[in-house]
Image: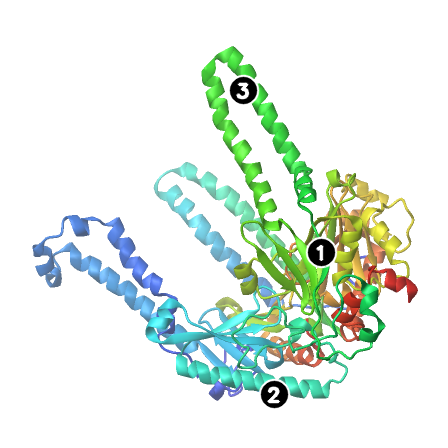
Amino acid sequence: MLDPTRPEGITFVPVSPALIRVRVIGAIITFAVLATPSILITIFVDRWAAMAFIPITLLAVWILWLIPRRVRAMGYYEGKDEFLIVKGILFRQLTVIPYGRIQYVDVKEGPIARHYGITTIEMYTASAETAGKLEGLPAAEAARLHDALAARGMVEHAGL
Amino acid sequence: MAKNAESTIRAAESGVPEERWQRVHILTPFIQSWHLIVVIPALIAWQNPEIFTEFSVEDVRNVFDGTSYLSYILLAVAAVILVIVAISYLMWRRTNYALGDEAVWFRSGILMRSQRHARFDRVQSVDIVQPLLGRIFGLGKLRIEVAGGADSHFDIAFLSMSDLEVLRNQVVALAAGTRRTTQADNPTVNQAAPDSTGTPHYLPSEATTEHTSDDLHSGLTISSANGQTVQNGGAAQNQAPAHSAIPMEERALFSVPAKMHIQSLLLSLSFLISALVLIATIVTAVLLARWGGAEVLLAGAAGLVPLIIVPAQVIWTEFNTNFNFSAFASAEGIRIQRGLTEARSQTIPPKRVHAVEVTQPWLWRKMGWYRVRIVQAGNAVLEANRGQSDILLPVGTRLQAELAMWLVVPELGVHDPLSFIENALNGANDQADPRFIATPKSVRKLDWLTWKRRACAVTPAVFVIRQGRITRRTAFIPVERIQSVKVSQGPYERTLGVADICAQVVPGSIPTIAAHIPAQHVMTLTAELVRLSAERRYQDVGLTWEERVQHSATPFAVEDTR
């Protein structure tokens, strides 16, 4: 069926699968932090505290199942005049950002992401709602995109 | 991670050679987090009041013997402060700025490294800001405003005042130089009427002033016009060049008489509902009192108080803010005067308006009244301080609403603008107007209330979104103001074969989402919006503001004769 969030004739470049690992590690850390109190209480105080453990575990399992699918659904494409970003499986999104509208590009990497060699870049336009965030780019690709976007934005900018 | 000669490329560090990065003042982390250093001992003291109540000289003498509890507390506090100082030192080392060839760069962060740059040709203003603590130490920060929406400034903090002056002059000079070369290189960029919010304000004398009337700030003075009748202004002045010596007088556009204003406030659904609830509560209290006695009445009276105060407060605020609302056309834009207890005057340069919405609440339909709101581009700091309004016309007749719209959206790009507006404001999907892409009947399952009114239209000049059944709303977005386009589709929408298009503009209170558009239209619409937006950005803007307001009596009618 016709998918308006995936224009025809465009193959989106997927982000690096290392992002899956980064997100999984982040999820596991969060889960550990959330689950530790209930684990400790279960062991030392009262066995029934394990009941608190169950919903957290279910949530964690669901999120861990979801992460690889979400990451594989993310992609980008450098068009002739615009930059396209897609994401989402159930709630699909396509963001089209003309190069001339890009005000600046932020580059960020957290400690875990740096270990796996991936980076996040975020494009800002004059609109606060522009979802120009792209995670999971290999560091070299991120650097290249950063320079390319900045250069094209400068050439084509036309005020507000 | 192998560290070979060409060490792993850190994306957050590219762009500027290492030696050009400079450090900020060493006191920076202290100023930025002084409250932490103060709060932690204060917290400890507050939670352990024994420190003060059971304080004895013995304890002080025994501090260094390690036998009094005071020594442990001091140790803990010292450890915490040490940790804070260590982290601050690391952060200080990683906070750098640099003046590159085309942009000013700023990077910071130890774990979460981030790097930002602002291109010189995007710089709008360069200010020196001194918070209180900075003033004590003689430090300040450089605030660089970049053309854009809410979060569009970044600070280089903190540097000594002399360093700041030097840096500011450098940035200003580089920005001016870059602007000159880009103008020379890009003759297609419209130079006759420079886009107001893209014009940088970095000339040293202007850099610290706020920029409202920037578009026509370069001393544009226009031939005078008699404010009353248009024909008198006439042909002679129309041919006068844009920079003649006689200043333009203000021309009255529209105003809201007090009676109409009060009536419009009373004819609002929220007021009616609160009045009904109030009456119902009084009746219930009286009935219950007959059954239960006077105490019930007293209790009911207590509950009545908020029911009276809150709606009264809302109505009073609205009345007070927009009392005597009048709009004038001046050389610098639309000047709006309003207010009862606090008279306010603000000027809106028309190019600053990025979207217009015309609404008609249900109870105004019989009176034929409309309300016009706008989205203005501007610095977030400015808006917060000056309370700029987003109302162009709080209540007005259809003609006044059309005039208000025409002021900020000069042309609609259709050959029959008046009937187009009629369809946009009051139309419904059962009229087969080919210009409007309507939501299909299947959307009834998703939105049974308003699906018949939902439609959108793209003309070469504007993107129109029509929605709302009880309160009718229509948004007009000039295509050149669209910053980016987002297409989204939820699971249920996928089964119905529809999707949403959001034309993203600068932050404002007008919704710009066209919901539940059939999928096949979505793709063509998106492509067209992006294409039109690019084309219009570079086009000539036609008549200047002065020419428009002087020789036109009836808005949009001018287009009919073209």
From the viewer's perspective, is the residue at label 3 or at label 1 nearer?
3
Q: Which amino acid, mark 1?
A: Arg
Q: Nearer the viewer, residue B425 or B465?
A: B425
From the viewer's perspective, is the residue at label 2 or at label 1 nearer?
2
Question: Eyeballing the image, is B318 above or below B59?
Answer: above
Identity of the residue drawn at 90% across and 58% down? B416
**Residue B130: percent from left, percent from top:** 42, 71
Which quarter of the figure is the C terminus of chain B placed in? bottom right
From the viewer's perspective, is the residue at label 3 or at label 2 nearer?
3
Q: Is residue B560 left or right of residue B165?
A: right
Q: Residues within 10 Å of mark 2 (few under 14, many from 20)?
A: few
Q: Which residue is mark 1?
A: A92
Q: Which amino acid, mark 3?
A: Ala
Chain label for disc 3: B
Q: Residues within 10 Å of mark 3 (few under 14, many from 20)?
A: many
Of the numbered discs in the image, which one, if any, rests on residue B177? Answer: 2
Q: Residue furthest top?
A: B291
Q: Which amino acid, mark 2?
A: Gly
Tally of numbered tags: 3
CB atoms of marks 2 and 1 within 8 Å: no
Per the image, label 2 sits on a secondary structure element best described as helix
Q: Which residue is mark 3?
A: B285
**Residue B371: percent from left, percent from top:** 72, 49
**Residue B38: percent from left, percent from top:** 30, 61
Question: Eyeballing the image, is A2 above or below B313?
Answer: below
Q: Residues within 10 Å of mark 1 (few under 14, many from 20)?
A: many
Identity of the residue drawn at 87% across and 64% down? B559
Chain label for disc 1: A
Q: Is residue B131 left or right of residue B271?
A: left
